[in-house]
Image (tube, helix red, strand yellow):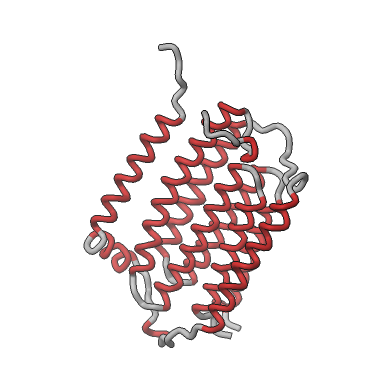
């Protein structure tokens, strides 16, 4: 077992464990912090896949911006009582994991049947910055503009949604 | 053991299943958004793995877009949660039964 293999095992096991902890943790702040761990371990898997730029982006955007937003909202809402989600929630408690398992089993069966074309180790894609970002600004220029417009719309939408309607 | 495409896809599928479970089990609007983030993350992982083993940049470019869309989606979602909390003093989704504001 090489170092990359053991790193893959460590990252994926830690990822799955943190995702489980997000689900079962009764405290919303703890869930958010476990979600940060999920993002960090995913960034580790990206590094193993040689997608260094996306790993940095993952840490910056997800673990940085999005999680700070989540924590701000949790503290803004100021929920006093711990969320006892397992009480009076039997259909979801049984049906949710069943749906997750059914999805996993479907994907597992599909993966078992599919054979991917073999790729020689030297021809695997290495995602350095130039190779990843050149298509973004050439072939995918219109989607980039649309994504920028979408972010602008989201910004304005958030301002409109959270505005307090006062007498002024 | 050589770590191949299938291993990454399996991890991605497990993460997606866990995100789906989180959405279905937790009745808390914030936790539902977190489950959604896990789903998007699982899709990103699958895209990056395909990009690595299919030697093309398109998967990583798509991941770039997914991250941008996720940022917009979570900002809007949290704004809606805050607005609902002001109205109903609760973020339990079972309390949001009417379409009227």
Towards the viewer: B41 or A91: A91
Q: Is residue B66 above or below residue B74?
A: below
Q: Is residue A56 left or right of residue A40?
A: left
* Numbered disc total: 0
Identify the residue at horizontal 49%, vertical 78% (top origin). Answer: B5
Q: Nearer the viewer, residue A84 or B100?
A: B100
View extreme (right): residue: A87
Left or right side of A66 for A12: right
Q: In this view, does A106 lie above or below A37?
A: below
Is B95 on the left-hand or right-hand side of A149?
Answer: right
In which image quadrant can residue A98 be found? bottom right
Residue drawn at 45 percent across, 84 percent down: A116
State which quarter of the image contains the C terminus of chain A. top left
Q: Where is residue A55 in the image (x, y as percent from the top left)?
A: 45, 61
- Residue positioned most to the left: A138
Question: Residue shown at 35%/44% (left/top)?
Answer: A151
Residue B52 percent location from the top left of the image: 41, 74
Name the quadrant containing residue A97: bottom right
Residue displayed at 46% across by 72% down: B49
Q: Where is residue B18 in the image (x, y as percent from the top left)?
A: 62, 60
Quadrant into which the N terminus of chain A falls: bottom right
Q: Report whether B65 appears left or right of B17.
A: left
């Amino acid at each position: 077992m090489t170092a990359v293999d053991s790193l893959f095992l460590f990252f994926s096991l830690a990822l799955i464990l943190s995702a489980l902890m997000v689900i079962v943790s009764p405290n919303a702040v703890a869930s958010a912090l476990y979600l940060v761990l999920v993002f960090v371990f995913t960034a580790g898997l990206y590094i193993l896949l040689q997608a260094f730029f996306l790993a940095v982006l993952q840490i910056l955007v997800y673990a940085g911006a999005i999680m700070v937003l989540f924590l701000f909202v949790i503290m803004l809402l100021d929920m006093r009582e711990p969320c006892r989600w397992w009480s009076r929630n039997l259909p979801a408690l049984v049906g949710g994991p069943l749906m997750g398992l059914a999805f996993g089993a479907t994907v597992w069966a599909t993966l078992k049947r599919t054979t991917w074309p073999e790729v020689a180790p030297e021809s695997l894609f290495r995602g350095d910055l130039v190779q990843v970002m050149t298509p973004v600004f050439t072939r995918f220029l219109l989607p980039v503009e649309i994504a920028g417009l979408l972010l602008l719309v989201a910004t304005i939408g958030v301002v409109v949604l959270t505005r307090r309607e006062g007498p002024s | 053991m050589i770590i191949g495409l299938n291993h990454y896809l399996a991890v991605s599928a497990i993460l997606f299943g866990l995100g789906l479970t989180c959405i279905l089990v937790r009745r808390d609007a914030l936790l539902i958004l977190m489950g959604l983030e896990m789903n998007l993350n699982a899709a990103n992982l699958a895209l990056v793995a395909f990009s690595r083993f299919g030697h093309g940049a398109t998967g990583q470019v798509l991941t770039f877009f997914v991250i941008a869309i996720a940022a917009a989606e979570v900002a809007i979602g949290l704004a809606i949660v805050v607005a609902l909390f002001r109205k109903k003093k609760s973020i339990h989704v079972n309390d949001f039964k009417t379409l009227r504001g």
